[in-house]
Amino acid sequence: MRTPICDDLGIEFPIFAFTHCRDVVAAVSRAGGFGVLGAVGFTPEQLEVELAWIDEHVGDHPYGVDIVIPGKYEGMDDMDPEHLAQTLRDMVPEEHLAFARKLLSDRGVPELPEGESNELQLLGWTEATALPQVQTALAHPKVALIANALGTPPVDVIELIHDAGRKVAALCGSPHQALKHKEAGVDLVIAQGGEGGGHTGEVGSIVLWPQIAAAIAPTPMLAAGGVGSGQQIAAALALGAQGVWAGSLWLTVEEADLPPAQKKQLLDASSRDTVRSKSFTGKPCRMIKTEWTEAWSAADAPDPLPMPLQYMVSGDCVARSHRYADKALSVMFNPVGQVVGQLDHVEKTSAVVQRLVEEYLEAVDRLDTLTAAAAGA
Amino acid sequence: MRTPICDDLGIEFPIFAFTHCRDVVAAVSRAGGFGVLGAVGFTPEQLEVELAWIDEHVGDHPYGVDIVIPGKYEGMDDMDPEHLAQTLRDMVPEEHLAFARKLLSDRGVPELPEGESNELQLLGWTEATALPQVQTALAHPKVALIANALGTPPVDVIELIHDAGRKVAALCGSPHQALKHKEAGVDLVIAQGGEGGGHTGEVGSIVLWPQIAAAIAPTPMLAAGGVGSGQQIAAALALGAQGVWAGSLWLTVEEADLPPAQKKQLLDASSRDTVRSKSFTGKPCRMIKTEWTEAWSAADAPDPLPMPLQYMVSGDCVARSHRYADKALSVMFNPVGQVVGQLDHVEKTSAVVQRLVEEYLEAVDRLDTLTAAAAGA
């Protein structure tokens, strides 16, 4: 499965692993793939600690960092971060906060200790908060790629990354967005089908991937959404991808640091147990269907707020559900794609990479056999 | 792309074409694929006319017939057809009929001529109406396959078809349904991802296909939902399919007898212009998003009725939108999958089959080249 981006990045397999866990980043890159650390939950100081750890454990291999810059908010471009945060806080209705709090308290999910509340917290969902993350990442020479999970990165951010000699990737769910990425100077476009976990569009991977590959050629496309086996990688490459971007797959590996109850919920879930819901961040985000997602889509629920406001409502519940996972499965925040139905046991990260490569080769063999049979018939 | 089912059915390519147009059935089978006529709109007498025409035009090639038997309706098994139809008619609220009528009249779509109204008509959506279709089909020796578009066919119907020496196929959208099909004796399971047109589930093809192939092995799986190119066929075979089942692809071919305005709507649509809606038949059915589908999902709309009642509401609107297509695009009934975004010009059916084969071979070549590059690296 060697494609041109393997040479560009100095990797063996074009298997990109998005994860929030530094151990998985290092393990994937050591195994010949390309680990990408999701930075959205970290302050710049925390991110520095994580990247220093990865540098120590990844050997000579490159890795990446994923940030979230969902574009500008109208009229807020020039605000300083504290003013921006306060302006956004004032936009969150009390009704939404009360609705969210009640969902968790009704189910006996404990509150966070005094002073640790995440309510109304603004994480790295704006350029103001994401830019320091980019600067932190660029100080680490093994960081070969910065990816933006949502929307086209601002041109100044792309220039900053290019000037440092690194590559830029960006996710999208339509050919239109893909072309915007390409025009802005993005080096790798990640096409994520609606099957995918987290923020995702409506169009399925089998339809979306070839459309985007054709629209942006010769810019390379990575296929995301529904990749959890080597057969799925073969399908992606047959459809024009130069590699794959997988997230869900790494949530249940041995090295992943999810709470055990959350990991078990993933191992037990079928592909029909996820839903695209705006209740987490304000944009459709695929996650395990729970009483939380169901409640926000009920007729008597307030409409989820637009990004970034909804996370200011849900953020405290996210933190509580993860901290007290045993008691919070019915309202657990567990973003994952439909590929979750393929995850039924814990594997080491390196074993997953090896399995993907072997399954890929088997799938290509299968196609060759079918083609040979036709030629001989 | 020769797989064992090619030998079983005596065809060159495992490309199954679902269509309501007899010309397309004959053209696909003559080109080496396998045409399947959707029989749901036909009385047994009309179906006999269509099949006799196909027999004359298909040469020595086999073809199939697709029926709809959505299982039994509780408490209605023993009713005679007329009693059943009346019982169902009595269950349709006037509110729904009025809501539907107003949607079309507000947009200036003419009514059907006196005496031709389709309102409250029950088509072949029950075993009572579908069984005569099966019997008609089995009288034609070139009919090698009967497919059921919805649910597991009743055991007596499967036996009837097997006793006549023909094969049975059935569509599904989950491994659970696939196993029910297999246990009932279905010979070919068609796994349709959520991208597909018409009745379809939620799980995307890239995830669904390998799950179903593994669940029912060694029973063969045909991949449906998102198949419109040879690359997509290569992906399907890499994921374990023995062939593909495509419907949308044949709506815009030269031979397809859709009203020109309806065909143009398909050629103009992107992959984001479809929606899964219960407003057509009562079960989620992917079709072009229109003011009809939007109206039925609005807060003030009546909830769509369960199958088969909703079609008794929509059926007259379906007939009107097709008869007066030029005036009815805003409420057109145009079931199609997300693959519609790939359809942008009219081709001859035989050219489509040839293109699929060529694109398939290119995709396999591409994978071989990548594998060779890795081996040489």
Image: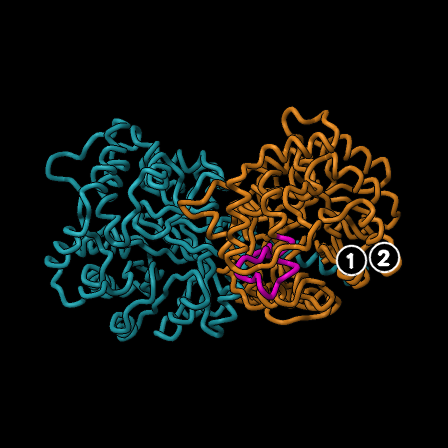
Chain colours: A orange, B cyan
Residue range (magenta): A318-337
> As shown in the figure, which amino acid type bears the numbered disc 1?
Arg
Expressed as whole percent of the image width and height from the top left, the position of residue B150 reads 33, 60
Expressed as whole percent of the image width and height from the top left, the position of residue B209 reads 51, 62
- Residue A191 position (above or below residue A357): above
Task: Tell me: B327 left or right of A203.
Answer: left
Residue beneath disc 2? A53
In which image quadrant can residue B55 be found? bottom left
Expressed as whole percent of the image width and height from the top left, the position of residue B56 reads 27, 54
Report the Cα–Cα distance between label 1 and label 2: 8 Å
Q: Earlier in the sequence, mark 1 or mark 2?
A: 1
Task: Tell me: A141 left or right of A14.
Answer: right
Residue beneath disc 1? A22
> As shown in the figure, which amino acid type bears the numbered disc 2?
Trp
Q: Residue furthest front?
A: A114
In which image quadrant can residue B251 be found? top left
Does the stretch in magenta take in B258? Answer: no
